[in-house]
Image (cartoon, grey):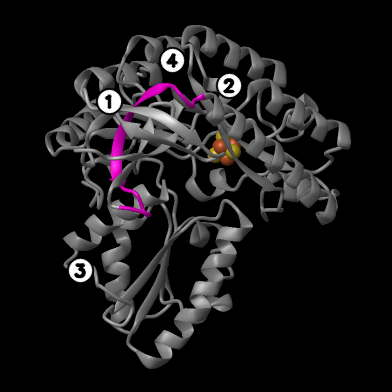
Amino acid sequence: MNQADSDIITTLLGNGGYRQASSEEEAGIILLNTCAVRENAVERIAHYLQHLKGVKKRYPDLLVGLSGCIPQYRRETLFDDFPLLDFLAGPDTYRALPSLIAEAASGCRRVSRLDFDTSETYVGVEPSRSATLSAFVPVMRGCNNMCAFCVVPFTRGRERSHPTEAVLNEVRALSESGCREITLLGQNVNSYRDPAAGTDFSRLLDAVSREVPGIRIRFTTSHPKDMSCSLAETMAARPNICNHIHLPVQSGSTRMLGRMNRGHTIEEYRDRIGMIRNMIPGISFSTDLIAGFCGETEDDHRKTLELMRDIRFDSAFMFYYSVRPGTPAARTMHDDVSEDVKKRRLQEIIDLQNSISSELFGEAVGTVVEVLAETESRRSSLQLMGRTETNRVVVFDRGRHSPGDLVRVKITGSSSATLRGEALPDY
Ligand code: SF4
């Protein structure tokens, strides 16, 4: 989502007469577009700002700004914590960036625009995308849920969706420009509702896949409680919609899901996975997992490991819980799992996921898969890197193929994160 936002910001600044610099030294303005979802992301920005202090000493006219979720989330303290900052913009106020920069350049330091605007979707702003083969297309912004651990409702505000027609126009233009894969994006993408007609995400997905039948379609991130039967039907019916779903579960314990305010039980999650697997054989799932959320017992943790063994996710984003100030958990719960226990549980989750991924990838050896080639491999120009429609990374001997080709690849080896193979000549 932040990458997609950065592409929108680049366009808005370009329209305002600014152009991208090639280095820190050349830049007159440095703008960091930020994420606040984990403490680690906030720490990285703090380190980079520390580095920019030195740059600003050398170039006193340099303007430094933050945009995105951190300014929205830490608006009260940022200017005091980081006196080098000149301007701040939130996720709904990127359009104000050219005027904020102009104000800051005229000597009026510490300027900000951080209001929520529930009508802002940036529809009509064509993102400046750097990649040509694959593209993110935001279809909704914000989140109406209130998961106890999450800052998103406080940084991005309430849900709002793009009109279906605007999404179709955007994917059509991408298709005409040579794009081969589109990922529809939203914080809670499957709660999409067309603002006028009220049509849901399965209808949008169906319409997009028909509009650009030669392009692979993906989407992220889905919420389990909005994972409908009609969405699975659409995926099963349309050949260009990739058979992969990122479906965050966070914990394998219904008790913890209740404390997290996730809005579903673990039985409901298992049922949805079962329903989708029945309809789409061979589909892959990835997930998000949090170790050591407030009140988590060894029994809750054991249930998470049990769920992982049963579902066999292809991959997972795995973290241990850290308090995000201002969230429901920070206000009403005690962060009572010690750091040692959180780290140990997280390590057990990571070890299990690595062994499941290794098994699943090992089972793929000997099969033939269709891969969309994305780039040359980092190790050798004689190899290409691409993904299967189930989102598995494949590195293969390229033969006569180039990035952008759909290639049939025979899988000859695997690790826990990558498949290796060779292009078959007859494709
Ligand atoms: S669904 Fe929950 S975790 Fe996801 S963005 Fe919304 S509040 Fe955060």
- Mark 3 Cβ inside 8 Å of ligand 1: no
Which mark lies nearer to you, 3 or 4? 4
Which mark lies nearer to you, 2 or 4? 4
Mark 1 Cα shell of 10 Å, populated few (<14), some (14-19), many (≥20): many
Q: Is residue 82 magenta?
A: no
Label 2 amino acid? Answer: Lys
Label 4 amino acid? Answer: Leu
Residue topped by disc 1:
164
- Mark 2 Cβ inside 8 Å of ligand 1: no
Mark 3 Cα shell of 10 Å, populated few (<14), some (14-19), many (≥20): some
Residue topped by disc 2:
225
Of the two numbered discs 2 and 3 on the same chain, state the one appearing first in sequence.
3
State if disc 4 and disc 3 touch (CB < 8 Å).
no
Location of residue 190 with respect to 290 vertically, above or below: above
Picture quadrant where residue 366 is located? top left
**Who's the residue at 87% across and 31% down the image?**
299
Mark 4 Cα shell of 10 Å, populated few (<14), some (14-19), many (≥20): many
Whole-percent x, y for residue 179 in the image: 21, 37
Mark number, residue 231? 4
State if disc 4 and disc 2 touch (CB < 8 Å).
no
Of the two numbered discs 1 and 3 on the same chain, state the one appearing first in sequence.
3
Which mark lies nearer to you, 4 or 1? 4
**Who's the residue at 41% across and 41% down the image?**
118
Of the two numbered discs 4 and 1 on the same chain, state the one appearing first in sequence.
1
Give, as a single range, the part of the protein colored magenta. Answer: 364-380
